[in-house]
């Protein structure tokens, strides 16, 4: 499958909410396959379709040690979060060369449509939870650095522009 190019920040599509997917088709499955190939090439632990210019609510996550365990999600929604938090460095190929430590819930339960077209719920923890939340943010038109204070966010964007 072809590896897709990332759209660069500040492309307005990165600030636009993805359209709902609804019924899963072979086209969606093919997009997921391309997304997994692209994620593996980064390398990364997740990818949302808007990052490659596809404005649909599709995401993939694979935070496994062995790889090859990607979870394909359409229209994911967080339905429960833990009180425990996780702080993890996050970055994006859409704004390369910079990252920031982001605080998120350590565990989340997510409802999504899987590659069979079934609406399911799955619990994620650790890096899996961080990546799922990061991808859901992308689908809503948010970037990881939106979770930083204005001062830290401005510094990060300035540093990225210099790089």
Image (cartoon, helix red, strand yellow):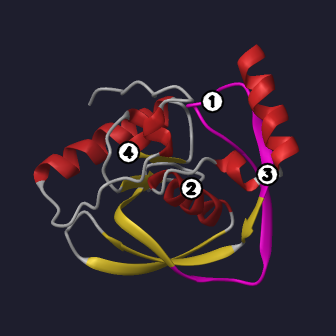
Q: Alpha-carbon neighbours of circle 3 within 10 Å: few (<14), some, or many (≥20)? A: some
Q: State how far apart marks 2 and 4 are (Cα).
A: 20 Å
Residue at horizontal 72 percent and vertical 19 percent from the top: 161
Residue 28 seen in the figure: yes
Nearest to the observer: residue 152 or residue 133? 152
Q: For mark 1, what is the residue? A: 95
Comparing labels 1 and 2, the label whose residue is closer to the camera: 1
Residue at horizontal 25 percent and vertical 63 percent from the top: 115
Residues at marks 1 and 2 touching, judged by CB atoms closer than 8 Å:
no
Q: Is residue 32 magenta?
A: no
**Disc 2, SS:** loop
Nearest to the observer: residue 41 or residue 95? 95
Image check: 131 left or right of 71?
right
Q: Report x, y in % for residue 10.
A: 56, 30
**Disc 3, SS:** loop
Q: Report x, y in % for residue 92.
A: 61, 37
Q: For mark 2, what is the residue? A: 64
Q: Is residue 81 magenta?
A: yes
Q: Which mark is residue 23?
A: none
Comparing labels 2 and 4, the label whose residue is closer to the camera: 4
Q: State how far apart marks 1 and 2 are (Cα).
A: 24 Å
**Which comes before the other along the chain, label 1 or label 2?**
2
Comparing labels 2 and 3, the label whose residue is closer to the camera: 3
Q: Which mark is residue 49?
A: 4
Q: For mark 3, what is the residue? A: 148
Residue at horizontal 52 percent and vertical 25 percent from the top: 8
Residue at horizontal 34 percent and vertical 56 percent from the top: 57
**Which comes before the other along the chain, label 4 or label 3?**
4
Q: State how far apart marks 2 and 3 are (Cα).
A: 27 Å
**Disc 1, SS:** loop
């Amino acid at each position: 499958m072809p590896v897709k190019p990332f759209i660069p920040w500040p492309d307005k599509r990165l600030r636009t909410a993805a359209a709902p997917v609804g019924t899963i088709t072979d086209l969606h499955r093919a997009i997921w396959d391309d997304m997994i190939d692209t994620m593996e090439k980064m390398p990364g632990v997740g990818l949302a379709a808007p990052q490659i210019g596809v404005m649909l609510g599709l995401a993939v996550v694979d935070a496994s040690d062995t790889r090859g365990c990607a979870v394909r999600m359409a229209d994911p929604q967080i339905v429960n979060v833990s009180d425990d938090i996780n702080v993890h460095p996050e970055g994006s190929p859409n704004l390369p060369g910079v990252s920031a430590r982001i605080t998120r819930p350590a565990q989340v339960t997510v409802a999504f449509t899987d590659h069979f077209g079934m609406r399911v719920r799955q619990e994620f923890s650790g890096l899996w939870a961080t990546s799922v939340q990061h991808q859901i943010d992308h689908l809503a038109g948010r970037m990881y650095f939106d979770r930083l204070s204005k001062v830290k966010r401005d510094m990060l964007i300035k540093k990225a522009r210099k790089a």
